[in-house]
Amino acid sequence: MFESLTLRLQSVFAKLKGKGTLSQKDVSLAMREIRRALLQADVNYRVVKDFVAAVEEEALGTDILSGLNPGQQVVKLVNQNLIKLLGEKVAKLKVASKPPTIIMLVGLQGSGKTTACAKLARLVKQAHKFPLLVCADIYRPAAIDQLEKLGKKLEIEVFSRGKQDPVKTAAQAVDYARQKGWDTVIIDTAGRHHIDEELMRELAQMKRKVEPTEILLIADAMTGQDAVNIASSFDEQLGIDGVILTKMDGDARGGAALSIRAVTGKAIKFVGIGEKLEMIEQFHPDRMASRILGMGDVLTFIEKAEHAMSKEQAEELERKLRRDEFTLEDFMGSIKQIKKMGPLDQLIDMIPGMGKLKVMKNFEFDETEIKRVEAIISSMTREERVNSAILNGSRRRRIARGSGARVEDVNALLRQFAQVKRMMKQMKGRGGRGVFPGGLRFPGG
């Protein structure tokens, strides 16, 4: 997410870092590089022009704050203006004054709309509410079947009437929700490969019939400026209340995220960061700006860790890290907990400075790797798991035979374990307590 943009911006800031003062020429050159970086990230041209002008004006008209060098001051100004560009405040879902809250999800075919419906329903359920999913896409083959399978997986009821008129189905679903006490209705509407009159007419009829609390557009972040144009068109013809950006984990250059709010005036409410149903995040403008600048996003990391690990588990891990008692058993358990939090490369980007640590390069586990790690560690004796220093050549060969792995696999695992321990020492040296789950503070803790 934003990797290319982040690298380009960091290169600009690095050039300013060693300067004692900033001349107008320095600022102009830096702004030219920032403009180029944003345009290469597919940010709307007018948005880039206004953004750079605002930062340049502030950079030339602001006294250097105490404790900040000129380069840091420019970073601060860029960060402040990125937050403004992204919307400043968190845009939460609206809640109807009288249940049910009705949310219509609209968008083009292929944007990830049906999956986004399920992801949103999962978040609603986590907030101790009772969502009802509605199949109102009768045109895409298997759309109804897909939503029903997702609903079953989440243990959330799905309302479907087959190939019946979608507007009628949506209206019946709302009546059903009122009768059964569901407090949130999420409607998966039809999409097309392009915006056409027939699509908009159907969506407008549905809007009049069910009177949604919110209409959210599902936009594919990988389409860049096309996502912004689509958002503008849907808003003009239908009226949208916000955007969910999908596929932010892909090769998204960032243009859509940085342009949509400024061009349409509509807030980004959530971002999809992977295919799994738990891979959706509420959009925080300040945290996203921090990620773009390569400054990490510790708050989101902590929230993910709190969901993945109990207070007791966190306190026990913290105790072991503090006493340097972290063992291979703890290592395996930590891998499983981290996998619950999402892709490792995304987590690393949330921790300031972690992406630059050499020990993190190529450090990645997929599901197959986790199973192999579990098999290898399970083939060790209790003594070996607690004290890996005793694992000589003969022990490693025995463990490889017992786990169906190669000796090379056992050696690789032990190297990775050693890397993790070194990494933790580095984080400790950087004042890293509180960054890892073991240093979290839990509510009431």
Image (cartoon, grey):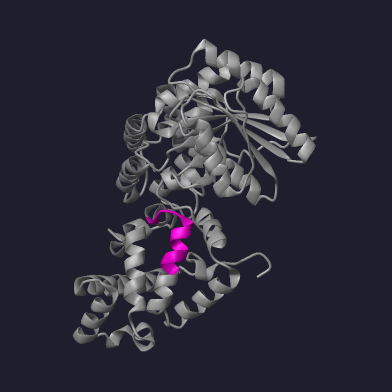
Question: Which percent across, then down, holds residue 365?
Answer: 34, 60
Residue 420 shows in this picture: no
Residue 338 located within the stretch drawn in magenta: yes
The answer to whether 326 appears left or right of 165 in the picture is left
Q: Nearer the viewer, residue 204 or 389?
A: 204
* The residue stretch that appears in magenta: 334-344
Residue 226 located within the stretch drawn in magenta: no
Question: Which percent across, then down, holds residue 126?
Answer: 63, 51
Q: Nearer the viewer, residue 396 or 169?
A: 169
Q: Nearer the viewer, residue 61 or 284?
A: 284
Residue 247 sits in quarter:
top left
Question: Which percent across, then down, holds residue 266?
Answer: 57, 28
Q: Residue at x 71, y 24 (%)?
A: 210
Question: Which percent across, then down, holds residue 170?
Answer: 66, 26
Q: Residue at x 54, y 20 (%)?
A: 234
Q: Residue at x 64, y 45 (%)?
A: 124
The answer to whether 7 appears left or right of 151 in the picture is left
- Quarter of the image with the C terminus is bottom right
